[in-house]
Amino acid sequence: MTDKPKIPAIDLKQLQFYYQNGGWQLNLPELTLHCGQHLFVRGASGSGKTTLLNLLCGITRPVSGELYVNGQPLHQLSSSARDSLRAKYIGVVFQQLNLIPYLSVLDNTLLSSHFAGQNKTDSVNRAKTLLQRLGLQQDLWHKPATNLSVGQQQRVAIARALLPKPTLLIADEPTSALDSDNRDAFMRVMLAEADANGCTVIFVSHDQSLTRYFHYQLDMQQLATGVQPC
Amino acid sequence: MLMKLARLSLWNRRGTVLMTWLSLTISIALLLGIDHLRTEAKSSFTSTVSGTDLIVGARSGQLNLLLYSVFRIGNATANISWPSYQRIIKHPQIDWAIPISLGDSHRGYRVMGTNTDYFSHYRYANSQPLVLAQGKPFEQVFDTVLGAEVAQKLGYKLGEQIELSHGVGAVSFSQHKDKPFTVVGILARTGTPVDQTVHVSLEAIEAIHLDWQQGAPMPGRQLSSEQTLQHDLTPKSITAFMVGLKSRMATFTLQRQINEFKNEPLTAILPGVALAELWQMLGMVENLLLLISLLVLLAALVGMITTLLASMKERQREMAILRAAGAHPWYLFVLIQLEVLLVTLLSMLSAAALLFISLYLLQDKLAADFGLFISLHIVKLTTLYWAGAILLLSAVLATIPGVLAYRKALADGLTIRL
């Protein structure tokens, strides 16, 4: 059922989140993204980006409202069900230091398919293809992740996020540690791979210049109300 | 993958893990070692004498009698006269009797006067008879049969001449210099005080004291070995004797009869009961040692958990990455449990190896210095119980960092706080 193209990658209605103690509040009236549609979320630090990401990844549950990822009601699922959902349908890339230092590049990549419970040999083959397409040659695969440059590390993170063929790729300022040349190369290769997998990208950044890569954009300032600590 | 993660994560922190492993290894080896030693010591101890139904001596406490007759520790308060001995062993229920006469020594080793019944009837461990490694039992008056350790330590061979000393100190001022003994036999090792005993005949004990009175040589009345042989060497008294009965049913009857013996105040003890009583006293020390080693183990385990807790901070990123890749918090909990179990398991293996090697190296020394025969079979049922208990304990303690990782994973979400 979930494979039908009509089902949006992400669909949320009247999403609301706030902490018990604070006056701060996050409101998302409506957002629907179909597979392959990319969204740029702009916001400074402290604007609730992390909260939004935690909501979208299923780490935290919204206080009210509905949130569907790939047709699955994330707001209703138990925490372990949300975890397995994240493993299968959502890839996450952080700002930096995405890799576990003591694992090899290949093992770092394979983590996601392991948690998604996918076939090992099949995953290894796909991981190798994916790494190659992201410009990470064979001689790097068995090196410890820490031996790589920051740009290379971010590409490994992309490979890991995309390996279980997720419907959603959530990237939290993945380019902030890169110089501009690397940044553009990274954006191109990330979006190309996401497109090849039919994956929707939600990209969070405060870097205005990156909006040109995206179909849609969202400003955090419009979502959050109340006191905003900086 | 879980295993690989645990393994590589430990390897990544090998500095602290190494120290944890070391302290756990030492404490587990200590615990297993003490447990092993006490069971071995107990079996070695309780097997000192076997097959003997009663030990009879002059009236005294049962421990005192047991200690001097079996363990050659301490001294008898009084002797048993030879006629009394002769009279008692005529009892129809008595199968055999071994007379014992103590009081002399040879370079720190006790000399025991007895007769050849000793070699045929004395039993130790599981009813094992004494075996002569070399030579034969004594026949002549001035023949001696050495315990294995005496021969080994002092380097005596068959045919060698030795002199006895009066009294039981390692250094004695009064020697029976004029009456040397010839080594005619050396017993095989038994792991009991027999190994540390110099055996001579009762007649020899009588002979070397013929020219003594009140515990000192009488001046001007010294007799040579040959001269003594002209005298009647029937002993006047013995220190104690061991009795084997035809039927064990008679044990208590005979014990009562001996205790109520009219001619002389005597005490008869059941060696098994006396050994158990003695072991109970020693058991206090043994239990204390075990308790201390348990506490040492606990300290080592707590140390491991402390280092783990300390490492949780630097591992926050690792946990967040795993979580982002789709790991349930439970997975992190299990990962930490697995790491703890791996370290504990590894420590147990190395502790067993350490214990085995040290026992292997110390075996001879323990046997020689303490008469303790410690087997190298450290893996037995109780060891497995200990291993299980240690693993369980470490798993229980590991829930602390495990739960911490779990809860932090839930609270922090995907954010990484540096």
Image (tube, coloured by chain):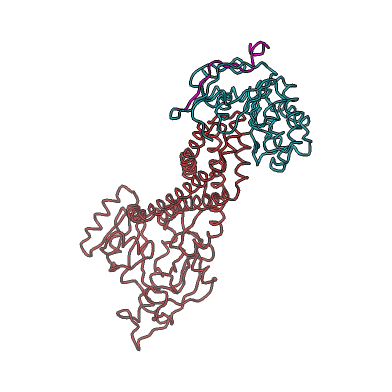
Chain B, colour shown:
red
Q: What's the residue at 49%, 61% (across, down)?
A: B366
Residue nearer the viewer, B21 or B137:
B21
Left or right of residue B262: residue A138? right
Classify residue B324 by image quadrant: top right
Residue A88 in the image: state x and y as whole percent: 63, 23
Residue nearer the viewer, B235 or B198:
B198
Left or right of residue A150: residue B393? left
Q: Is residue A184 above or below residue B372?
A: above
Q: Is residue B228 above or below residue B32?
A: below
The question of residue B115 being in magenta is answered with no
Q: What stretch is highlighted in magenta?
A: A1-19
Q: What's the residue at 34%, 60% (across, down)?
A: B66
Q: What's the residue at 68%, 38% (across, down)?
A: A177
Residue B47 in the image: state x and y as whole percent: 42, 54
Farthest residue to the bottom: give it.
B220
Chain A, colour shown:
cyan
Left or right of residue A27: residue A168? right
Residue B84 in the image: state x and y as whole percent: 27, 65
The question of residue A16 being in magenta is answered with yes
Residue nearer the viewer, B95 or A100:
A100
Residue B31 in the image: state x and y as whole percent: 47, 51
Q: What's the residue at 55%, 23% (across, down)?
A: A223
Q: In which quarter of the image is the N terminus of chain A?
A: top right
Q: Quadrant of the C terminus of chain A?
A: top right
